[in-house]
Image (spheres, rainbow, N blue to C red):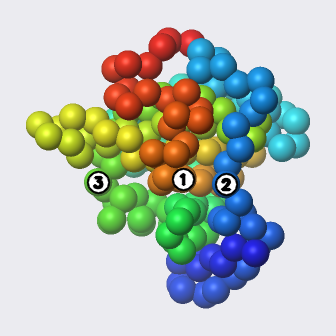
Amino acid sequence: NGERRTANGERRTSQGSTATPVTRPSTFHSTQSPTRTTDAGHPVDPALLERWVSAFEAYDIDALTQLVREDAIQSMPPYELWLQGREAVVGWWVGPGAECAGSRLVPTSANGLPAFGQYRPSGPGGRHEPWALQVLDFDGDQVAEFTFFLDTDTLFPLFGLPAHPDDAVAP
């Protein structure tokens, strides 16, 4: 069981959602489009994924806020960080998460969900470096849950993500 904390510090447990590693799909190809289906089997519109990428890379908080469901959940394994609700998620993004401004995303998929390799401009001279594997679970045209897996040394090679976003192969 994974332990989680809500934005107000309340402890919650789940059936391994934060402890279970992301698994690579058996049919994964690094050149696949990020268009995937949700757990409910509903396809995710490629235009919606493009809106996410554009908003995140521009770190356009207003546009990101529109893409987040009111009761959205964000977690960041291996940290105990677990936020619930649009206000808590956006509050994190404009607070400690503001270091993600200027990030670049490279598409992939994880567990049948759209995912992106996130690269933050934290290297020498602002060079983009691996930061997280973002896994997004959409409900309609909004993100219901975000998980940012930080073990990029392990995960990026498993998902065919390059060490630098300029080295990504276009889908």
Q: Say which quadrant the C terminus sits in.
A: top right
Marks 1 and 2 in Cβ contact (< 8 Å): yes
Mark number displayed over residue 99: 3
Name the residue rendered at 55%, 43% in the picture.
Answer: 155
Q: Quadrant of residue 11?
A: bottom right
Measured in 3D between alpha carbons, the distance from the residue under mark 1 to the one under mark 2, in whole angstroms, is: 9 Å
Residue labelled with disc 1: 149
- Whichever of labels 1 and 2 marks the residue nearer the N terminus, that label is 2
Q: Quadrant of residue 96?
A: bottom left
Q: Residue furthest top?
A: 170
Q: Is residue 14 above or below residue 146?
A: below
Disc 3, SS? helix
In the foreground, 66 or 103: 103
Label 3 is placed on what type of residue?
Glu
- Whichever of labels 3 and 2 marks the residue nearer the N terminus, that label is 2
Name the residue rendered at 43%, 40% in the picture.
Answer: 118
Res. 86 in view: no
In the foreground, 9 or 77: 77
Determine whether, in the image, residue 35 is placed left or right of residue 161. Answer: right
